[in-house]
């Protein structure tokens, strides 16, 4: 890995992409774009594997980059969640670009900021546990992810992100009913 590579920042952005990906899965299925979602998540999974010590697959990364770049244009503007899907696409874009730190002037905080913007654009009021909005839930998720990474490492972060993604999945299911 390049000495300028921010492993913690990349990991936290990947966790955000996974977390918000729970809702993106439901929304893209409804829009007939689940194949594009799958290619994006394959790229994210490759990056998590890279952070765990495996090699990056440039083909998977290229596909995730291309799909994240164009997903919001393909997602119907009249469908609920369009702004969320656009924000999630930006998170994924940042995650992919962060694997090449010398090529772009992007930092992990931009990905996490995009995650916050995506959930702030959620088109309906929602309550998740003790949180009265998706934005507050996401902020707590980001804080918990950072704590989990610091205390227990990458495997615990991935497990947490998957668990948190289920809340997003259910929120999107409620939205599209």
Image (spheres, rainbow, N blue to C red):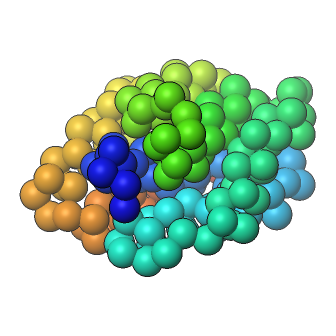
Quarter of the rendering containing residue 131: top left
Q: Looking at the image, which residue is at 30% across and 51% down?
A: 3
Residue 43 drawn above or below residue 11: below
Could you tell whether 123 is left or right of 113 in the image?
right
Could you tell whether 97 is left or right of 145 in the image?
right
Residue 169 seen in the current view: no
Q: Position of residue 176 (x, y in %)?
A: 74, 43
Query: Which quadrant of the rendered structure holds the N terminus?
Result: bottom left
Q: For this rendering, which residue is in front, 108 or 4?
A: 4
Q: Looking at the image, which residue is at 86% across and 33% down?
A: 73
Query: Which quadrant of the rendered structure holds the C terminus?
Result: top right
Q: Position of residue 121 (x, y in %)?
A: 60, 22
Residue 113 seen in the current view: yes
Q: Position of residue 91 (x, y in %)?
A: 55, 39
Could you tell whether 91 is left or right of 7 in the image?
right
Q: Looking at the image, which residue is at 72% across and 57% down?
A: 62
Q: For this rendering, which residue is in front, 108 or 166?
A: 108
Q: Looking at the image, which residue is at 55% across and 34% down?
A: 104
Query: How many numbered callouts?
Result: 0
Residue 18 drawn above or below residue 174: below
Q: Please, which residue is most extreme toward the left here?
A: 151
Quarter of the rendering containing residue 112: top left
Q: Position of residue 98 (x, y in %)?
A: 49, 45
Q: For this rendering, which residue is in front, 8 or 118?
A: 8
Quarter of the rendering containing residue 148: bottom left
């Amino acid at each position: 890995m390049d000495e300028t590579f921010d492993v913690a920042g990349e990991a936290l952005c990947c966790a955000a992409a996974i977390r918000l990906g729970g809702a993106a899965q439901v929304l893209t299925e409804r829009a007939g774009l689940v194949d594009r979602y799958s290619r994006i998540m394959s790229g994210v999974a490759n990056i998590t594997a890279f952070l765990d010590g495996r090699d990056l697959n440039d083909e998977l990364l290229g596909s995730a980059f291309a799909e994240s770049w164009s997903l919001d244009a393909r997602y119907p503007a009249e469908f609920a969640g369009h702004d969320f899907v656009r924000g999630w696409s930006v998170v994924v874009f940042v995650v992919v670009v962060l694997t090449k730190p010398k090529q772009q002037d992007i930092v992990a905080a931009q990905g996490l900021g995009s995650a916050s913007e995506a959930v702030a654009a959620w088109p309906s009021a929602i309550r998740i546990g003790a949180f009265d909005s998706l934005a507050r839930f996401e902020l707590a998720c980001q804080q918990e992810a950072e704590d989990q990474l610091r205390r227990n490492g990458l495997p615990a972060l991935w497990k947490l992100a998957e668990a948190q993604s289920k809340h997003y999945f259910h929120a999107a299911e409620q939205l599209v009913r």
